[in-house]
């Protein structure tokens, strides 16, 4: 009998939006994981975080989902010292790279979690706890049979809307137009979100951020970048 089949006691495994790939990790990144993660990392536990205690203050809070090598996360934290940033990533080399950037910048307004972002949103963050959520260049899973792995799905949109404060902002970017169109469909269908674009599609002037490594690669390949911005409605009508 297959796992999760009729009569099985094993719970069905959730569909992940990522694959843990093996990758070369440098000596510096390994040191960062060993020595810096205890300082700037937060363990995953299925209990809500007290973000005021984590950061030692009450400030606007921003979550970046899948921060890659952490360059954008670290730069935003440097540019906005009065804002607290929480980054979630699963790939060890990127986490190590991000920790090194935090150390080099002397940044005290960043914490990282090495875990699945959906579970972090579900278990560690509470309703109305975030001012912004950033999702830049998630895996587009271009093959049709893999579309179910795309992170932007109706349940995910509802979860992000719940964790954002009224008036909070969800920033997204992709260089894969079919995925951008799916994002529009999914987010437009979530009643708690309002598209910030006057045309109801992309925004031309996204929030200040440096180009990510994936964005730079996409532009080199001639890909158009689609930036989306949604605001959590203050009240439902």
Image: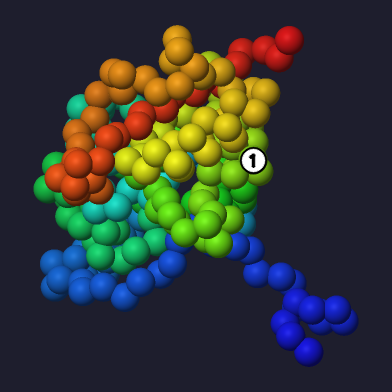
Which is nearer the eye, 152 or 30? Answer: 152
Q: Is residue 60 visible?
A: no
- Name the image quarter holding residue 62: top left
Which residue is at a point 27% across and 59% down the rendered structure image?
Answer: 94
Which residue is at a point 39% across and 39% down the rendered structure image?
Answer: 177
Q: Is residue 1 left or right of residue 110?
A: right
- Name the image quarter holding residue 132: top left
The colour scheme applied to this rendered structure is rainbow
Q: Give how far across and how far down residue 149 sits, in percent.
A: 54, 57
Which is nearer the eye, 202 or 19? Answer: 202
- Compared with residue 169, is residue 20 higher up or lower down, i.e. above or below? below
Q: Give how far across and how far down residue 49 sits, in percent.
A: 54, 45
- Compared with residue 36, is residue 22 higher up or lower down, i.e. above or below? below
- Compared with residue 137, is residue 186 higher up or lower down, i.e. above or below? above
Q: Give how far across and how far down residue 194 sits, in percent.
A: 56, 18
- Residue that carries the numbered disc 1 in the rendered image: 154
Query: Regarding mark 1 in the picture, which secondary structure is present there?
Result: helix
Which residue is at a point 20% across and 57% down the rendered structure image?
Answer: 97
* Quadrant (top left/top right/bottom left/bottom right) for the C terminus: top right
Q: Is residue 133 left or right of residue 161?
A: left
Q: Give how far across and how far down residue 141 sits, in percent.
A: 45, 56
Residue reaching furthest to the bottom:
1
- Name the image quarter holding residue 127: top right
Q: Is residue 198 left or right of residue 156?
A: left
Which residue is at a point 59% across and 26% down the rendered structure image?
Answer: 188
- Compared with residue 74, is residue 188 higher up or lower down, i.e. above or below? above
Which is nearer the eye, 63 or 108? Answer: 63
Q: Is residue 109 left or right of residue 234?
A: left
């Amino acid at each position: 009998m297959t796992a999760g089949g009729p009569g099985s006691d094993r719970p069905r495994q959730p569909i992940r939006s990522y694959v843990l790939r093996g990758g070369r990790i440098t000596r510096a990144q390994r040191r960062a994981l060993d020595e810096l993660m205890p300082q700037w990392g937060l363990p995953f536990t299925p209990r809500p975080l007290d973000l005021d205690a984590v950061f030692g203050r009450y400030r606007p809070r921003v979550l970046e989902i899948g921060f890659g090598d952490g360059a954008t996360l670290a730069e935003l934290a440097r540019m906005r010292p009065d804002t607290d940033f929480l980054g979630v990533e699963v790939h060890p080399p990127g986490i190590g790279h991000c920790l090194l950037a935090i150390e080099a910048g002397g940044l005290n307004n960043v914490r990282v979690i090495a875990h699945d972002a959906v579970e972090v949103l579900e278990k560690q963050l509470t309703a109305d706890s975030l001012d912004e959520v950033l999702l830049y260049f998630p895996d587009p899973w271009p093959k049709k049979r893999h579309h179910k792995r795309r992170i932007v799905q109706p349940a995910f949109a509802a979860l992000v809307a719940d964790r954002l404060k009224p008036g909070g902002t969800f920033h997204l970017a992709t260089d894969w137009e079919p995925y951008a169109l799916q994002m529009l469909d999914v987010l437009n269908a979530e009643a708690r979100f309002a598209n910030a674009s006057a045309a109801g599609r992309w925004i031309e002037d996204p929030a200040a951020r440096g180009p990510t490594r994936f964005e730079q690669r996409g532009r080199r390949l001639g890909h158009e970048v689609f930036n989306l911005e949604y605001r959590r409605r203050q009240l439902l009508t």
